[in-house]
Image: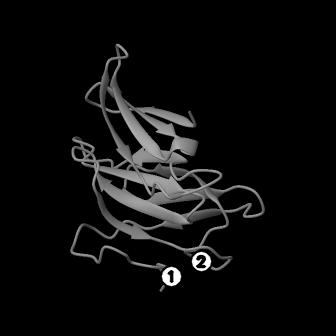
């Protein structure tokens, strides 16, 4: 297990990093569901950390995948990946092992890197709209 995050509605989302899955439990410990993320991932696994969107329903999960160098935006109810962004590298919008993810009250996303990444990046919330499934590197403007 690599993370455990409680949601506003009484569920607990667990990162099982090396087994490439998110598991969801009631606070009592009763298993609810799970989702495998990028099952071909080897080594460090694909599910490193999660954060929730700041709307009252916490409609979205943001998942940091340090091995595949991505952040996934997922629907919290279905656990389906809606879009993903990022890639491996040293430039803005890229990571060298994105390890932690958090959101603030304005919806901004913060990521932190491990290993030789050693940095924090902020992605500014611009609202909800239509995006591609794979956004690639989100370059600053």
- Label 2 element class: loop
Q: Please state the horizontal and vertical placement of residue 20, each as a whole percent of the image.
A: 49, 47
CA neighbours of label 1 inside 10 A, class few (<14), some (14 to 19), many (20+): few
Going from N to C along the chain, the mark reached first, 2 or 1, is: 2
Q: Where is residue 88 shown, x and y percent of the image?
A: 61, 73
> Residue 35 placed where, x, y %?
35, 44
Q: Which residue is mark 1?
A: 140
Q: Quadrant of the N terminus?
A: top right
Outermost residue, bottom direction? Answer: 141
Give the CA separation, mark 2 to mark 1: 7 Å
> Badges 2 and 1: C-beta atoms under 8 Å apart?
yes
Label 1: state its secondary structure: loop
Residue sitting nearer the eye, 76 or 35:
35
Residue beneath label 2, please? 92
Please report the residue visible at 71 percent of the width from the left and 55 percent of the height from the top: 114
Horizontally, residue 138 falls left or right of residue 118, namely left
Q: Residue furthest top?
A: 28
């Amino acid at each position: 297990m690599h993370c455990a995050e409680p949601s506003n509605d009484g569920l607990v989302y667990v990162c099982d990093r090396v087994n490439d899955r998110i598991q969801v439990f009631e606070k009592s410990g009763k298993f609810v569901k799970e989702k495998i993320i990028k099952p071909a991932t080897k080594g460090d696994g694909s599910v490193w950390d999660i954060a929730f969107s700041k709307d009252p329903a916490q409609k979205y999960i943001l998942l940091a995948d340090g091995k595949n160098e991505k952040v996934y935006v997922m629907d919290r109810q279905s656990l389906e990946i809606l879009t993903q962004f990022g890639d491996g590298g040293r430039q803005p919008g890229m990571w060298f092992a994105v390890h932690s993810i958090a959101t603030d009250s304005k919806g901004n996303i913060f990521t932190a890197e491990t290993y030789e990444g050693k940095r924090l990046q902020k992605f500014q919330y611009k609202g909800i709209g239509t995006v591609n499934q794979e956004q690639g590197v989100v370059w600053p403007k």
